[in-house]
Image (tube, rainbow, N blue to C red):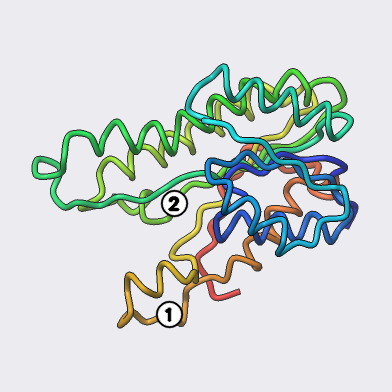
């Protein structure tokens, strides 16, 4: 597989993001990671044993100006961009819609949808220069209805809708947009939150990372506008 030359990975300090960063670096890509926690960024650097191909900067991706500044810095550091994995997000499920805290709605939309929109808007001018690929993250839970997590479900279905719209808009402009839609990811946090759950069909982050890297690579050139289910063991 021919890897992308230089990519942004938002959420790169999280479990899935770290797996994507590792896979991309192992394949020879340059990788730019926006972060909120200096401690988590330092941990990522230590974990990957970076040799000069990993760039990071603090950024609040929900702020359009901050997202644009980060992307500009990333493109300068990496000599351009040809891909982006928009993985930053969070889950909240406080129960029935009318009982959930009002702030949960705004927080889920900002964290899961606004960050993706801000990054896509900032990255497109760079990707349009030479073509490229964007991968977003939806949710099988959201697609199934998201009972008890309405704000989360709406935010993730918004990501799916945005991915499809941008794929249609850019189909003839050389930039592809696809979305992976996981079930439960086998992370330490999910194991702690659901200690008695059946983990037989949880998907390891490394398995999803391989798919993300494939969708970012030129090898997946015919594919755009796809919502790819990722809910098997892998």
Image quarter of the C terminus: bottom right
- x%, y% of residue 108? 34, 38
> Residue 139 got which mark?
2
The residue under label 1 is 199
Q: Is residue 215 left or right of residue 15?
A: right
Q: In this orientation, which residue lies closer to the viewer: 34 or 129?
A: 34
What residue do we see at 22% from left, 34% from top? 103
Mark before the other along the chain sequence, 1 or 2:
2
Q: In this orientation, which residue lies closer to the viewer: 161 or 36?
A: 36
Q: Quadrant of residue 73 in the image?
A: top right
Q: In this orientation, which residue lies closer to the viewer: 177 or 204?
A: 204
Q: Are marks 1 and 2 in contact (CB under 8 Å)?
A: no
Task: State the SS at label 2.
Answer: loop
Q: Residue furthest left?
A: 99
Image quarter of the N terminus: bottom right
Q: Is residue 99 left or right of residue 104?
A: left
- x%, y% of residue 26? 84, 61
Mark 1 → mark 2, Cα distance in angstroms: 17 Å
């Amino acid at each position: 597989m021919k890897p992308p030359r230089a990519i942004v990975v938002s959420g790169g300090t999280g479990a899935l993001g770290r797996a994507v960063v590792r896979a991309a670096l192992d394949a020879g890509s340059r990788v730019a990671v926006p972060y909120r926690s200096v401690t988590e960024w330092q941990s990522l650097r230590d974990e990957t044993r970076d040799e000069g191909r990993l760039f990071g900067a603090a950024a609040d991706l929900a702020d359009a100006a901050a997202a644009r500044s980060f992307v500009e810095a990333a493109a300068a550091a990496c000599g351009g961009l040809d891909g982006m994995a928009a993985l930053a997000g969070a889950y909240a499920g406080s129960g029935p819609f009318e009982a959930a805290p009002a702030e949960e709605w705004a927080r889920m939309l900002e964290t899961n949808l606004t960050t993706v929109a801000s990054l896509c808007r900032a990255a497109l001018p760079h990707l349009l220069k030479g073509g490229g690929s964007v991968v977003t993250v939806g949710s099988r839970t959201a697609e199934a209805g998201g009972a008890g997590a309405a704000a989360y479900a709406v935010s993730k279905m918004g990501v799916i809708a945005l991915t499809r719209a941008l794929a249609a808009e850019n189909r003839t402009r050389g930039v592809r947009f696809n979305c992976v839609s996981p079930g439960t990811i086998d992370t330490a946090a999910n194991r702690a939150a659901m200690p008695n759950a059946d983990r037989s069909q949880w998907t390891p982050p490394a398995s999803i990372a391989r798919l993300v890297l494939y969708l970012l690579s030129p090898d997946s050139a015919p594919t755009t506008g796809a919502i790819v289910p990722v809910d098997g063991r892998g």
